């Protein structure tokens, strides 16, 4: 099924791009653009790596160049109307789909498209804090904390977080569902975090009572909370 999806996705560009391979490759750039699609497919299909979808997404660049080259080789001066229609077919449906995905993501609160005032204040305080160290936060916050504060997070984007599924489940249990107190304290210490960040979404737990022996200070910013943890031998002090 995956192979069928790949073929159907690539076909609108791959079919005209195939025409370009009839023409000789005279320069290094000609060779590079012809080899790029095959190299990207190898990266996408090989069993290791963090996020092979990026290689697949990048196929649009070489295939677009080859498609134009291939079409012009057999149809040197296509009518403007034909070019406009082809571009509309290639661009409009995908753009509509992307807008729909963005709307659904906003409604589901899957990503931090909107940052509340309290969250921004908490992140400003975290960025200004001179003490080094990473942040333990829900996966939702992991998308914005690194670039907003310059700090590493325990769980961030899927493409660069080790054991992403496991880390998401653990943080969900801590921040949303609740862990037994000994388990929560053990988990927080094991992450090596110096800070714990809780955003403004409803339903997140107040961790002050559960983590009290680990906490150095608690700062509340309207609906967001920043916990500073005491240093211990396992604390990862990034930048120290």
Image: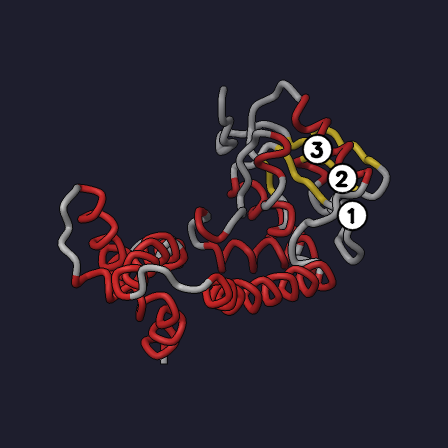
Whichever of callouts 1 and 3 sits on the residue coming sooner in the sequence is 3
Residue 177 rendering spot, x and y as whole percentages: 69, 61
Whichever of callouts 1 and 2 sits on the residue coming sooner in the sequence is 2
Mark 1 → mark 2, Cα distance in angstroms: 7 Å
Q: Secondary structure at mark 2?
A: helix
The numbered dot on residue 123 is: 3
Q: Secondary structure at mark 1?
A: loop
Judging by the rendered image, the residue that carries numbered circle 2 is 119
The numbered dot on residue 81 is: none
The quarter in which the N terminus is drawn is bottom left
Mark 1 → mark 3, Cα distance in angstroms: 12 Å
Q: Are marks 1 and 2 in contact (CB under 8 Å)?
A: yes
Dot 1 alpha-carbon crowd within 10 angstroms: few under 14, some 14 to 19, many 20 or more: some
The numbered dot on residue 200 is: 1
Left or right position of 125 against 22? right
Residue 61 lies, with reference to residue 45, above or below; the image says above
Q: Are marks 3 and 2 in contact (CB under 8 Å)?
A: yes
Residue 26 rendering spot, x and y as whole percentages: 14, 46
| Residue in the image at 60% along x and 42% along y | 136
Q: Secondary structure at mark 3?
A: helix
């Amino acid at each position: 099924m995956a192979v069928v999806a790949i073929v159907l996705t690539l076909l609108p560009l791959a079919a005209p791009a195939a025409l370009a391979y009839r023409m000789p490759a005279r320069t290094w750039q000609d060779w590079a653009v012809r080899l790029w699609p095959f190299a990207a497919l190898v990266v996408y299909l090989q069993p290791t790596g963090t996020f092979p979808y990026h290689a697949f997404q990048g196929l649009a660049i070489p295939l677009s160049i080859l498609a134009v080259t291939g079409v012009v080789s057999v149809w040197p001066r296509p009518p403007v109307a034909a070019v406009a229609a082809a571009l509309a077919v290639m661009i409009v449906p995908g753009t509509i789909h992307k807008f729909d995905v963005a709307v659904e993501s906003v409604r589901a609160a899957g990503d931090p498209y909107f940052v509340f005032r309290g969250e921004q204040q908490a992140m400003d305080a975290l960025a200004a804090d001179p003490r080094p160290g990473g942040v333990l936060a829900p996966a939702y916050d992991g998308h914005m904390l690194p670039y907003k504060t310059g700090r590493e997070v325990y769980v961030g984007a899927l493409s660069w977080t080790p054991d992403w599924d496991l880390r998401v489940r653990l943080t969900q249990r801590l921040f949303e569902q609740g862990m037994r107190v000994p388990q929560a304290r053990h988990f927080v210490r094991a992450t090596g975090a110096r800070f714990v960040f809780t955003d403004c979404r409803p339903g997140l737990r107040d961790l002050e009572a559960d983590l009290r022996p680990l906490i150095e200070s608690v700062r509340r910013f309207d609906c967001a909370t920043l916990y500073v943890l005491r240093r211990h031998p396992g604390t990862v002090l990034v930048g120290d």
